[in-house]
Image: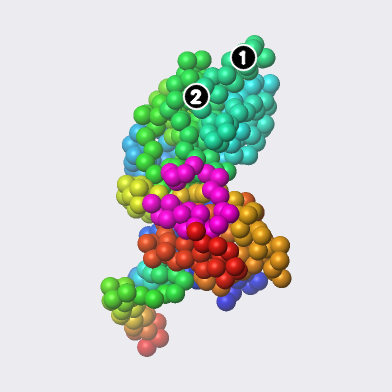
Amino acid sequence: MSKRAVDAVFQALFLLSDVRFLLRETAPGHDLDEGQKERAATTLEKVKRQVAILEEELVR
Amino acid sequence: MKCAVDIESRDVEEMYINIDPIQAGGRLTADAMKAAISFADGYSVCDNCRSPFRLDYIKKPPIAQFHADLAAWLNMDAVRVVPGARRGFQAVASTYVEKGDPVIVTALAHYTEFMAVEEAGGIPLEIQKDVKNHITPDAAAEKIEAVIREFSKTPPLLFIDHVDYQFGNVHDVAGIIKVAHQYDIPVLVNGAYTVGIMPVDGKTLGADFVVGSGHKSMAAPAPSGVLATTNEHAERVFRTTQAKGDVTGRTFGIKEVEMMGCTLMGVTVVGMMASFPHVRERVKHWDTEVAHSQAVTDALLSIEGTKVLSDYPRQHTLTRIDTRESFDKVAEQHKKRGFFLSSDLKKRGVTGVIAGSTKVWKFNTYGLTEKQIRHVGESFVGIARENGLNIV
């Protein structure tokens, strides 16, 4: 049982939901302002960390 | 991209600005999307259902608290979540209306109010709208008097839409309730276009029942809604079952008849709950939403020949517009006929106007950002210019 992997899946999906919401807020051009770009970058960095956890837990 | 066999993923909200008249207030918040991911399984909220076994008693997730919070927020005494506003109408009609009873609705009532009355065996009778497309207290009084004269009995229920779906006009609900109460007629306020997007105070309105729609105006998955009432009516509409199996002798505890036991058992209720803090906050910014609606309406009115059929200045984000003398004139000559408007809008990243509509149609600007509002207004004006219409 890998609680860490399960948590990482949910966390990644939640973070991606924030990205999805950002796409909605900026539709149709998705022309992000500086603040939005920063938000996107921070969120995507966090997604990468969750994916790394998943690789650690499930693949390696 | 497909999300499952033969099911295309839906990316309308991500790819376009959606001004569909019924979809705007039901767009999920990010928190509701997260809750939906977590609670997508069927009976997901039932993991910790303990005696007494009923949805509104569940403490984890905090559904019981949500019910209390919803009641307080609407300034009503008791609430239940229901699978859509229509199920709220149905519960109330089923409780109060007997076969052959006259029931007052309005000329602007949603069809599901008629169906709730019909299912209960009642006869729906409409209060006439005035020339400004309003339902007035005077018209309500006139109809009540006429119905009492004709049926020799007082209607057991009156439905009034706080904001109607046809024009997005705000009606004098408090005034109509005052009139109905003079005849001891309980009133159900249909808040499908108000609860969750603008402030609603049930007690101030004097409502006996307030019904809201989760998927229309509370940023919740469908089908979801809320039925709120007062202590006076709660015991009756939320009565518990008295049924007993004649063979087994089984009884069914505190299950409520009109709720058919439990109602929203998964993603719908947690979606509503997750959006609720945002919903509670967003109704405080109603003025901004109305200003946005006004801006798009004004952009449309700048196109020569266009008329607004809803109240003007706008008091709501749902608007009915008449473009028979503008976009419909273009449609007469255009190779795409009436489809040119929705097609051109889509090219500009705007969707939600019914394909083919160039005569009388509706749009809803709720929840759009300032930038998106500008884009929508500029899109309408741009399309008009490109097609030779005058901008005044």
Relative depth, front residue between B92 and A8: B92
Splitting the image into 4 quarters, where does residue B368 fall?
A: bottom left
* Range of residues picked out in magenta: B291-315
Q: Chain of mark 1?
A: B
On the image, the x and y values in percent for residue B224 come to 50, 47
Asked whether the viewer can see residue B242, the reply is no
The residue drawn where x is 37% and y is 88% is A60
Left or right? Give the position of B120 relative to B273. right
The residue tagged 2 is B137
Q: Amino acid at mark 1?
A: Ile
Give the structural element (helix, strand or loop) at label 2.
helix
**Dot 2, how many residues are within 10 Å of its Cα: few (below 14), some (14-19), or many (20+)?**
many
Which of the two discs, 1 and 2, labels the residue nearer the N terminus? 2
Classify mark 1: residues with Cα within 10 Å, few (<14), some (14-19) or many (20+): some
Residue B21 horizontal/vertical position (percent)? 54, 53
- Circle 2 marks a residue in which chain? B
Q: Is residue B87 magenta?
A: no
Q: Is residue B181 above or below residue B1?
A: above
**Whether residue B231 is situated above or below residue B346 in the rendered picture:** above
Relative to B235, is B368 above or below? below
Q: Which residue is mark 1?
A: B148
- What residue is drawn where x is 45% and y is 46%? B314
How many angstroms separate mark 1 from mark 2 (CA)? 16 Å
Q: Is residue B232 visible?
A: yes
Q: Residue at x 40, y 29 (%)?
A: B205
- Establish whether labels 1 and 2 are both on one chain: yes
**Which label is found at residue B101?**
none
